[in-house]
Image (spheres, helix red, strand yellow):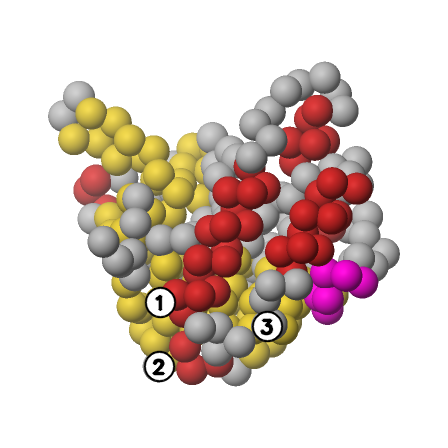
Amino acid sequence: MAARRITVRIDGTDLELCPERALHWPEGGVLAVADLHWGKPESFHQHGIPLPPEVLEDDLARLSAALRATGARRLLLVGDLVHSRRGLTPEVLERVTAWRSGHDVEMVLVRGNHDRHLDSLPPSWRMALVEPYLDEGPFRFSHHPEPARGRYVWAGHLHPTVRLSTGADRLRLPCFHLGTGVGVLPAFSAFTGGMDIRPRSGERLFAIAGDSVVEVPPSRSSRRTRG
């Protein structure tokens, strides 16, 4: 079964919300993701906390799937590409290098707070590094969700999630949170916490449910809290 994306129109431009936790801007040939936190399990391992070693493999496979499905020519990494300096082990460096060699696309990292310790990126990753934001067409890509005059901002940082309630059933899912001037992408890494969102007037939530993206009616989301 093919993955189901949802098309939204922002400032006269069509964009696709993808179940791989990515934003696709077809006109610009851009795929944007946020909060990958590469090396997070390795950071915890060094503190004696065992975490699943396949987290990076799963995330890289999903990122590859999103690039193939959309045919994007550019990949924008909207902050927090890596979790910490400790997490950039030789194994992580080597695995990402091998993955990068299989993708002939331009990649740009917009520095996030977890990337602040990076003076530069490994040359073998072939990624440009910009800060504090990147302006493209009618949009601004910035890790922190702060409004910008004259541009719609796509950001990360908050790891938005939505809690769905139907009778006694409860479900928490990653989501896209689209405000009137700022849209927040879900954390790309499946190994993150999140911030539960209840949309205010004029805002929309799109939950990621397996291979589909579905819009959440305001009445179905629960109270805004930190997760």
Q: Residue visible at 70% across and 32% down? A: 42
Locate residue 110: give its quadrant. bottom right
Q: Amino acid at mark 3?
A: Val
In the structure shown, which secondary structural element does the residue marked by tag 3 occupy? loop
Q: Amino acid at mark 1?
A: Glu
Q: Which residue is mark 2?
A: 12
Q: Would residue 83 be seen by someone viewing this image from the given angle?
A: no
Q: Which residue is mark 1?
A: 16
Residue 105 has which mark? 3
Nearer mark to the viewer, of 2 and 3: 3
Please name whichever residue, 159 or 224, is drawn nearer the observer in this view of the structure.
159
Q: Residue visible at 22% across and 31% down? A: 165
Q: Amino acid at mark 2?
A: Gly
Label 3 crowd (10 A; few <14 / some 14-19 / many >=20): some
In the structure shown, which secondary structural element does the residue marked by tag 1 occupy? strand
Q: Residue visible at 20% across and 25% down? A: 169
Real-space Cα distance between discs 3 and 1?
A: 19 Å
Residue 205: give x, y in percent of width and height. 32, 51
Label 1 crowd (10 A; few <14 / some 14-19 / many >=20): some
Q: Would residue 33 be seen by someone viewing this image from the given angle?
A: yes
Disc on the earlier residue, 3 or 1: 1
Locate residue 50: give its quadrant. top right
Residue 102: give x, y in percent of width and height. 60, 63
Residues in magenta, as a range: 123-128
Residue 214: give x, y in percent of width and height. 25, 52
Real-space Cα distance between discs 2 and 1?
A: 13 Å
Q: Is residue 125 magenta?
A: yes
